Image (cartoon, helix red, strand yellow):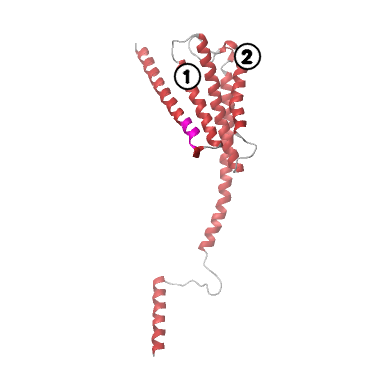
Amino acid sequence: MGELEDHWLLDAVTRAALALSVLALAAAAVTFALVRALRGLRNSVHLQLSLSLLVAHAAFLLGMEPSHGQASCVAVAVVLHFSLLAAFSWMLLEGLLLLVLLVLVFVPAWLRLRHLLLLGYGLPALTVATAAAANPGGYGTARYCWLSLERGFRWSFQGPVCVIIAVNAVVLVITFWKLVQKFNDINPNMGHLQKMRSAPPTGPGCAAPRGDPLEVTSSSSNTGNTRVSRNQL
């Protein structure tokens, strides 16, 4: 009885979390698509990432329903496989795009959205098609609508994900290294400017007054008054 109650609670929490995630991703996708101020190559990547995660979460939510046949279960598994691979691909492309913008500052002319779309959706589609051709019965099982664990079929998802995580880790290290280099280039110039500002003026007529500024001002005013009184005499 306790296991059934725990299973029901976990199922309810999962459904609620997925429903909220779908709503949030839909709102994010609409925002990136309709707000003109957010239009650009980086936000286009954010839009595609949001759409991929939206489809994946919606498919996962539909796949939790027990009342579906084998064909629908296979369809859910294929959509999950493709959408999750697409989400990881867009994460990789986002990291590479940030590195390119950090190094080149501006988006190069050869980098366009159509090229990113070809990579972000083309590579996952090629992976899913190859996996389905190699093992047609690998999608959907009697217990869940996901990849079969037989014949190492799960590596058609885990393999690309591991490669993407490794490449993103390398991109992260290179990005930090480039940032450290840029800060090191800026700091010596800032130190030189601070030294120039703090250095006393030199040259004829540039001697800095000594003592309290109020005393200097007072003595200057007294000298001016003495000169005026002498002229009056």
Name the residue located 61 percent from the left edge and 25 percent from the top edge: 122
By secondary structure, the bulk of the magenta-drawn segment is best described as helix
At horizontal 46% and vertical 17% (from top left) the residue drawn is 62
* For residue 51, above or below residue 100: above
Q: Secondary structure at mark 1?
A: helix
Which circle's residue, 2 or 1, is located before the other in the chain?
A: 1
Q: Amino acid at mark 2?
A: Ala
Q: Quadrant of the N terminus?
A: top left
Q: Which residues are magenta?
A: 28-35
Q: Which residue is mark 1?
A: 60
Q: Is residue 212 visible?
A: no
Q: Is residue 206 left or right of residue 110?
A: left
Whole-angstrom CA distance, mark 2 to mark 1, is 23 Å
Mark carried by residue 225: none
Q: Few, some or many C-alpha atoms within 10 Å of disc 2 (few <14, some 14-19, many ≥20)?
A: few
Q: Position of residue 123 (x, y in %)?
A: 61, 24
> Circle 1: is it few (<14), some (14-19), or many (20+) Cα within 10 Å?
some
Name the residue that disc number 2 marks: 133
**Hey, what amino acid is under mark 1?**
Phe
Residue 213 x, y percent position in the rendering: 41, 71
